[in-house]
Image (cartoon, rainbow, N blue to C red):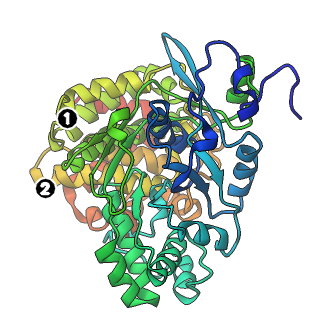
Amino acid sequence: MQNPDLTPPRDATLADLPDGVLRPRYDRSAVTAGIVHIGVGNFHRAHQAWYLHRLMQQGDALDWGIVGAGVRAYDEDQRKKLAAQDYLTTLIELDPAGTAVEVVGSMIDYVPVAADNAPLIDRMAQPDIRIVALTVTEGGYYIDPVTKGFDAGHDDIRHDAANPATPRTAFGAMVAALRLRRDRGIGPFTGLSCDNLQGNGAILRQTVVSLARLSDPDLADWIETQCSFPNSMVDCIVPATGPKELELVRSLGIDDAAPVTHENFRQWVIEDDFCAGRPDWDRAGATFSDHVHDYETMKIRILNGGHQVIAGAGEVLSVDSIAGCMAHPRISALFDKVARDEIVPHVKPVPGMTPESYVALIAQRFGNPRIVDTTRRVAFDGSSRHTGFVIPSIRDGLASGRPVRGLALVEAIWARMCDGTREDGTEIVPNDPFWGDLQSAARLARSDPAAWLARGHLYGDLGGVADFADAFDHWLRMIWDQGVEAAIAAYLEG
């Protein structure tokens, strides 16, 4: 029920919002659609939607409005919340120096969620849509974790290949919409991944084209030659919204059912490869570059990899936030040493930033006490995040002959976490799509560490590489015998 003492973020009430709240200066009724975005979570609304909103504040890109979309039943709840407030979102920037509040208006609609994805397919097939963007999490692209190829054997993919007109997945819906566009002579759209994956555009291309080829090889060829899939790097720390965030937005005088808190940092680096046009996002602070890979590597290895370095230790030691992990002297020292000694040597500088400087920047961002980013959220889906963010640094270290003992410790701590208990005896509730498998392996590894590395879909051949496997064995046995802090201390002492 709406609180009469608070102002909801709606078109009719924008002028009534509290003083100091930034709000759209443009006429939202004049904004028309250009983008469908699948996966309208907090990150999208704090990042991509914000960049477009800033362009619109300048009077630009009014024909690039965002139509939100989702493919899971729970997305319908999000659609209803946002529809009730005219698709406006309150962004709350949390900085140690103060709070800034802005209502973002670049989203103008949200496709109804249906099991057969018919409304989504129809909307993407309309000629006004020129970009289909996605934030569907790192683990959502149907990638074999070892080969990095397309996982054609997944049940969802088998369904979409057999039922191309009624797909389950976002990618199946994209294929179906592209089929309609081809057949109607409308032309292609750009597929833009905004997920934390190295080469995310190439991965999106692989998924869409490979899925299309299972049911319509001619369509797959058309997509491959006509559509574009630019790589991009996205960066902003955006916690989940819970009771504290809802209480915060209401304390500011705003009755927003889906507010978003975020840090005071954003970065978006994109390949300029758009087959059907694009907004001038660079005028709002984004960077178009032919060297996205270097930016991606720096961010994914140091920030995303760094998150995994500290999150496992935080969970086992009952530290409930990322800022709390950075306030913990041993966890923060673990991050600094692993990042500088074992990750940085494999990362190239980018314009204006060295890897060493980036480590310092990330430490500062992780330590922001106003961003209550939970350790649990960051540790979620380790089976995707470790394979994507940590294991590549291990492989680079082994290939170059550099140390990997700290990264082996990080993996041992993750194995300890997946046992499902903390050192204080409390339970770590399931926190991975494959939790049952991980927990079984973690419990076997307590007496036989090699059992963890035997998970070939995670580690490939690394279980047979002595420099890594021996260090992992050493650390996991020490963790179970003496505890995580003792193992970290031993690593820090060299």
416 relative to 362, above or below: below
Q: Residue at x 31, y 67 (%)?
A: 460
Q: Which residue is mark 2?
A: 399
Q: Position of residue 60 (x, y in %)?
A: 44, 38
- Amino acid type indicated by mark 2: Ala
Q: Secondary structure at mark 2?
A: helix
Front position in the image: 270 or 77: 270
Image side of residue 77 versus residue 317, left or right: right
Image side of residue 419 versus residue 17, left or right: left
Q: How many marks?
A: 2
- Amino acid type indicated by mark 1: Asp
Q: Which residue is mark 1?
A: 341
Front position in the image: 385 or 313: 385
Which of disc 1 and disc 2 is earlier in sequence?
1
Of the 4 image quadrants, the one containing the C terminus is top left
Front position in the image: 250 or 302: 250
* Residue found at the far top of this picture: 97
348 relative to 327, above or below: below
Q: Residue at x 57, y 45 (%)?
A: 31
Q: Position of residue 152 (x, y in %)?
A: 44, 81
Q: Position of residue 287 (x, y in %)?
A: 28, 39
Q: CA distance from mark 2 to mark 1?
A: 15 Å
